[in-house]
Amino acid sequence: MKKSIAVLGLGRFGQFLTSELSKGGADVLVADGDEETVRRYANSVSCALKADLNDPDVIRNLGLAGVDTVVVSMGSSLDSSIMCVMVAKELGVPHVIAKAASLRMGEILRRVGADEIIYPEKESAELTARRLLSSDFLEFFDLGSELCVFSMKPKKDWIGKTLRELRLRDRFGLNVIAIREGGKASATVNPDEALVADAELFAVAERSKLDRVLH
């Protein structure tokens, strides 16, 4: 069954998000105050509406009551964001995500009902920093505020050693959950098999312990 998602606000973040959701097969509703921007998405989403997102009556008439998730993506407009979050929760939307330009804005949006706050620029900067600090990281995803999952190449001094010998969990708090070699991934990890240079490790770790892996 398709997930239904509403994106309120089509700035750069909202547009990127809408495009990716559409590619992924979601049932997407978008709304924005700019008619030209809305028109660009009319043929790629289920519903594209020009709407004044400062007006609670207009927001109530968008059809949000039946969607799974509402993403409020006007990070630079606190008033509109507050209004959209409050109305979405009043309508019974189970999951409301709000983009925030600052920690203070995020705190306010959470207080008025947002279930999740995202800081795209901060998160993008953190990811870029991790990639710059360590060429070993290949991909990185947050699993909330404390945990993350990532893939990485074995460090040079890990090659030829087994996971049991390396004691990655004890030393770094790193739990290897899968290994890919030669294009084939396996979730059955043999702790006594030596790591090779072209292996890709998939691991879960606490964000606070990442510095141990980086250095």
Image (cartoon, grey):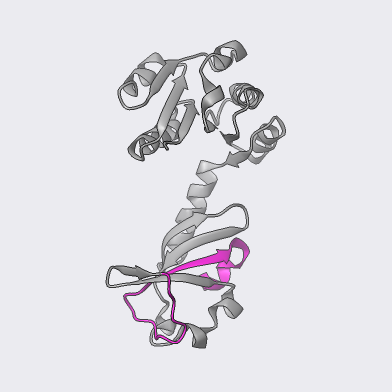
* Magenta stretch contains residue 143: no
Q: Residue furthest right?
A: 111
* 106 up-or-down from 87: above or below: below
Q: Front-most of 52 and 90?
A: 90
Q: Is 72 placed above or below 198 here?
A: above
Tell me which residue sits at (43%, 61%) in the image.
Answer: 132
Give whichever of 140, 121 is nearer the camera.
Answer: 140
Residue 154 appears in which quarter of the rendering?
bottom left
Q: Which quarter of the figure has residue 65?
A: top right
Q: In the rendered image, is residue 99 in sight?
A: no
Q: Could you tell me if residue 174 is visible in this image?
A: yes
In this rendering, the answer to whether 200 lies above or below 167 is above
* Residue at x-position 42% and y-position 29%: 28
Q: Residue at x 41, y 31 (%)?
A: 27
On the image, the x and y values in percent for residue 4 come to: 46, 32
Residue drawn at 60 percent across, 79 percent down: 170
Which residues fall within the magenta stretch? Answer: 187-215
Q: Quadrant of the N terminus?
A: top left
Picture coordinates of residue 127, whole percent (x, y): 48, 54
Q: Is residue 197 magenta?
A: yes
Query: Residue 52, image x and y in percent?
Result: 52, 13
Relative to 51, does residue 89 appear above or below in the rendering? below
Indicate the position of residue 174 as horizontal and vertical percent values: 55, 72
Q: How many marks?
A: 0
Instruction: Kindly give the residue lying farthest to the left in the view shown.
Output: 182
Q: Quadrant of residue 199?
A: bottom left
**Left or right relative to 62: residue 154:** left
